[in-house]
Amino acid sequence: MSRVCRGTAEALVALAEGQVVGIPTDTVYGLVIDPTREGAFAALYRAKGRPDSVPLQVLVADLEQAEGLVAGGVLPRSAKRLAERHWPGGLTMVLPRAPGLGFELGGDGYSIGLRCPAHPLARGLCSEAGPLGASSANLHHQRPLLTAAEISEAFGESVPVVVDGGACGGTASTVVDLTGDEPRCLREGSIPWSVILEVLAGS
């Protein structure tokens, strides 16, 4: 079984060791890794039973941390406008990745999905450990798990540490692809697509 804890000390140690950690967010529980640690990416995908062609998103502590991960070191105007309105919160933006970033996330290697969660524990971990590769806490094609106890039971030793933040029953984030000439909705979640378009129309 996983070790269920209240604070982040054990989580920080596990992340530094390349292990998978379960954490609460403002939407659903997530499984996170330090994407710079060798073997961490493979461990997360083994735990979920998920094909590695499906990329991880990256959780960040703030706008400054996000800008260090994108091409050119500055968010495009459209992304910055969305971030100012909906970060922290349920918005994931897919943007061109900074060349030579060295994160193991899966996918095409040229783009990166960024989210700043509206949960102090998640942002605190990102502040201390750096940006975190993340996926929802569920087995592939199954429902997201809503409590630390459910994660511990479902994943056991493959997720050695789970931080208990109470029940998470929110809706998954809305995912917006901003890598092309026009924005694309990859997933409509907690923020309606119509609201995203209204914000972008003002940029």
Image: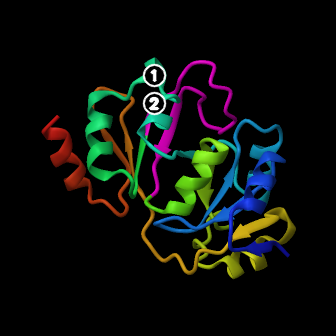
Which image quarter is the N terminus in? bottom right
Which image quarter is the C terminus in? top left
Q: Residue at x 67, y 45 (%)?
A: 129
Q: Which one is in front, 9 or 39? A: 9
Q: Quadrant of residue 165?
A: bottom right
Amino acid identity at mark 2:
Glu
Verify CB contact (< 8 Å) between mark 1 and mark 2: yes
Left/right of residue 21 with respect to residue 60 in the rendered view: right
Vertical placement of residue 170 versus 159, above or below:
below
Q: Position of residue 38 (x, y in %)?
A: 82, 37
Amino acid identity at mark 1:
Gly
Vertical placement of residue 152 versus 48, above or below:
below
Q: Position of residue 82 (x, y in %)?
A: 28, 43
Q: Residue at x 81, y 72 (%)?
A: 3
The residue under label 2 is 67
Q: Quadrant of residue 174?
A: bottom left
- SS for callout 1: helix
The residue under label 1 is 73
Main SS of the magenta segment? loop
Specify whether residue 88 is painted magenta. no
Magenta segment boundaries in residue numbering: 94-117
Left/right of residue 159 with respect to residue 82 in the rendered view: right
Residue 155 visible to an observer of this rendering: yes
Residue 49 visible to an observer of this rendering: no
Specify whether residue 106 is painted magenta. yes
Q: Within 10 angstroms of label 2, few (less than 14), some, or many (20 or more) residues?
A: some
**Residue 150: assigned label:** none
Vertical placement of residue 75 versus 120, above or below:
above
Q: Position of residue 146 (x, y in %)?
A: 58, 78
Task: Indicate which disc, 1 or 2, sits on the residue closer to the N terminus.
Answer: 2
Q: Residue at x 61, y 55 (%)?
A: 135
